[in-house]
Image (cartoon, rainbow, N blue to C red):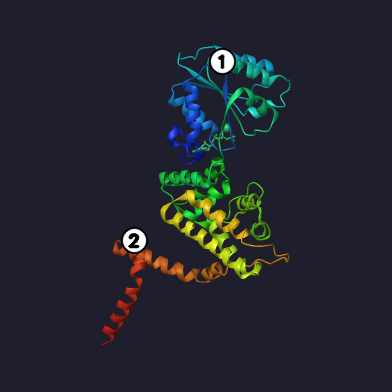
Amino acid sequence: MGNELWVEKYSPTKIEELVGQEKAAKTLRTFVNNYKPGSGILLIGPSGCGKNVLVSALAKETGNELLETNASDVRKKADIEEIIGGASRQMSLTGDGKIILVDEADGIHGNSDRGGVPAILKIVQNSAFPIVLTANNPDVRAVKELKKKCKVVKMAKLSEADVAKRLKDILSSEGIEAADSVIMQIAWRSEGDMRIAINELQAVSTGRQKITKENLEHLGEHGKRIAISDALKAIFKTKDADFIRKSMFACDVAPEEIMLWIEENIAREYGDASEIAEAYDKVSRADIFLRRIRRGQQWALLSYASELMSIGTARAKKEKNGKSIDYVFPQIIAIMGRTKFQRAKRDSEAAELGEALHCSKKRVLEQMPYFDIIFQHQGQGSNQ
Ligand SMILES: Nc1ncnc2c1ncn2[C@@H]1O[C@H](COP(=O)(O)OP(=O)(O)OP(=O)(O)O)[C@@H](O)[C@H]1O
Ligand SMILES: [Mg+2]
C-alpha cells in the first residue's frame, strides 16, 4: 500500500470526484447519451487536466465499455482501419454499449504514412458507437483537421483553487497535516497540472505526518523556473499583464512571500508618492484575500490575491524607473527568522503543556500570558 502512486490511488472513478471540469463532463455526457453517427467529440486540454479520467469515469457512469487506443498504437492507416474501424462496427463483448477513445490524437500527425486523419474522420462519421478523441495542442495540423469534423470540448487548465482543493482532500484521507501555505505553493507550482501536483505532494509527504514549507525546498524543479528578482523585475518594470502572470507562475516562491518582497521593494522602485500609495493599497487588498484564503479555505480567491499584488503594483506606476534596482530581502522574514528559535521553544512548551492539560496548543498559547502572572505570584508566595 505504501508504494502505491497517489495519482492512481486518487484517480477519480466518478465524475463528481473530478474538480473543475463540470462543463466538459456535462457536454460529454450529453454527447454519449444522445449519440447518433455523424460526428465524434474532441477533448482538447493541457496535460493533467483530467481528459482521460473524465472519459473513463463517464464510461463507468453510463455503463459503457471503454475501448482505449492511443494514436501511437495506430501508426499506419491500415491499423486505424482495422483497430478503430473494427471496433466501431462490432458490438461490445458484453452486449452493452461502448465508447471508443482515440487518445493523444496530436500524435496522428507525423505518422509514417499519410491519410491517418482522413481515415479516422471516415470512421468517426459512420461509427455505431461514440468516438472520443483527446489532444493537448489545438494548433497542430492533425488536430486542426479533426476539429472541422468533431464536436470540440475545450478543457481548461485547472485553477490553483481546484488543484488545492483536491490536494487537501488527499491529505485528509492520508491523515497528513499541512499548512495551507504549503498546499498553496504546491498548487501554484503545478501550473494546473494535477498529475504534477499530486506527485509533488506525495514526494514531500512520504514518511511524514506533517509537511512544512521547509520540506518543499528539496523538491526538484520542473518547467523553466525564474528567480524572485526576475519576477519582481516583471512587476516593477513592465505593465504587461500576461508577462507578469507568467512570471509569477514560473517563480518558485509562494504568493505570500512574493507579496512581502513586493511590499519591501515598492518604495525602492517607485519615487512618486501617489504611485507608492496606490501600490501599497493593491498589496494590502491582496493581503486581505490571502487572509481569507487561510481562514476559510476560499482557494478560489488566490488568483485575485496574486493579480492584485502583481499586476496591481505594476499598473500603479506612471512610467518605469529606468534605474536597475537591487531588490532587498523582506525585513519581516528576517525578523521572524531571528526570533524563530524563541518562537519554536514557546510552541514546543505550549504543546507539552497542552498534552498535560488536555487542551490544544492554540488554547495554551492564548493562556500563556496568565501563566506568567500565576507563576510570578507563586514564586513570591513560596518565598514568604
Ligand atoms: N480534474 C481532475 N480532478 C481530480 N483529479 C484529476 C483531475 N485531472 C487530473 N487528475 C489526476 O491527474 C491524473 C492524470 O489525469 P489524466 O490522465 O486524466 O490527465 P490528461 O488530461 O489525460 O493529461 P495528458 O494530456 O498528459 O494525457 C489522474 O490520474 C488524476 O489522479
Ligand atoms: Mg491523457
When the figure is inspected, residue 78 is found, relative to residue 318, above or below; the finding is above
Q: Which mark is residue 360?
A: 2
Q: Quadrant of the C terminus?
A: bottom left
Local secondary structure at mark 2 = loop
Q: Quadrant of the N terminus?
A: top left
Residue nearest the observer in this picture, 226 or 42:
42
Q: x, y (%) of residue 308?
A: 55, 56
Q: CA distance from mark 1 to mark 2?
A: 63 Å
Q: x, y (%) of residue 306?
A: 55, 54
When the figure is inspected, residue 62 is found, relative to residue 327, above or below; the finding is above
Q: x, y (%) of residue 246?
A: 63, 50
Which residue is under mark 1? 127
Residue nearest the observer in this picture, 45 or 152:
152
Residue nearest the observer in this picture, 230 or 167:
230
Q: x, y (%) of residue 164?
A: 49, 47
Q: Which mark is residue 282?
A: none
Q: Indicate yes or no: mark 2 CB to ligand 1 under 8 Å.
A: no
Residue drawn at x 43%, y 26% as measured from the top left: 61
Q: Amino acid at mark 1?
A: Ser
Q: Amino acid at mark 2?
A: Ser
Q: Quadrant of residue 334?
A: bottom right
When the figure is inspected, residue 240 is found, relative to residue 102, above or below; the finding is below
